[in-house]
Amino acid sequence: MKAIILFGHGARDARWREPFDRLAQLWQEQHPSTPVQLAFLELMQPSLEEAVTTLAAKGATDLTIVPVFFGQGGHLRNDFPVLLEECRGKFPNMTLSATPAVGEDLAVLQAIVDFGARAL
Amino acid sequence: MKAIILFGHGARDARWREPFDRLAQLWQEQHPSTPVQLAFLELMQPSLEEAVTTLAAKGATDLTIVPVFFGQGGHLRNDFPVLLEECRGKFPNMTLSATPAVGEDLAVLQAIVDFGARAL
């Protein structure tokens, strides 16, 4: 079974995660047969490994991790691959793949441009 | 004259800003009569004040600042309003307004959901 993890940075302020909760809710409404979990690099729970564990318990075997970051900076180029490899080591029977950061997607950038245009 | 500032967090890794440069380029292609500047909270230049100064020199009088952040955490709820007030004090003849974070926009979230769906 396929599943998806939306992987964000995390923050001290609990309100920071609201758009992530909304994202997961949108995903589940629109893709009810593909379980979703949020995961955070730091300061918020669950961790990537905890999210993979949750999805493994639901029977997921084929996991796509979407980094909900704008840029591919040090967190995604250095920290994230280490976490991903650790998860692959702990879940050898799962296929774990990762997309580029969502900020690399032209449609995401266009939605931001359109948001700005509406605000002028 | 109206103008727009796309305000991001900033990062140590120079590659992190690539989507922001792409955003500004998209904006300028699609809205050539509305100047755009990037600005960063920390670790990258220009600062918000530097970006406002640049746009003031171009004749902008009515500035919309779009926080290119997912969540409204401490940076946007505490740090950003202070910077905004400082800029208002230094540029009393300009109108400076700010939108919510782009992560509050449903179309931005939907673009992220669609990006994930294409990757499965």
Image (cartoon, coloured by chain):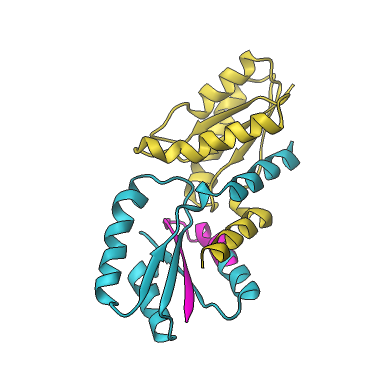
Chain colours: A cyan, B yellow
Q: Quadrant of residue A24?
A: bottom right
The answer to whether residue B55 is left or right of residue B71 is right
Q: Which of the two residues, A10 or B38, is positioned nearer the viewer here? A: B38
Q: Quadrant of residue B111?
A: bottom right
Residue B87 image position (x, y, % from top left): 57, 26
The answer to whether residue A70 is left or right of residue A78 is right
Residue at horizontal 58 percent and vertical 33 percent from the top = B24
Residue B58 image position (x, y, % from top left): 65, 15
Q: Which of the two residues, A7 or B75, is positioned nearer the viewer here? A: A7
Q: Which residues are magenta?
A: A1-22
Query: Would you say residue B107 is visible in this rendering?
Result: yes
Compared with B109, B93 (above or below) is above
Residue at horizontal 71 percent and vertical 30 percent from the top = B31
Residue at horizontal 59 percent and vertical 70 percent from the top = A27
In the rendered image, residue A30 lying in the magenta stretch gets the answer: no
Compared with B114, B93 (above or below) is above
Residue B101 image position (x, y, % from top left): 60, 48
Residue A49 image position (x, y, % from top left): 33, 71
Compared with A26, B45 (above or below) is above
Compared with A103, B13 (above or below) is above
Query: Would you say residue B82 is visible in this rendering?
Result: no
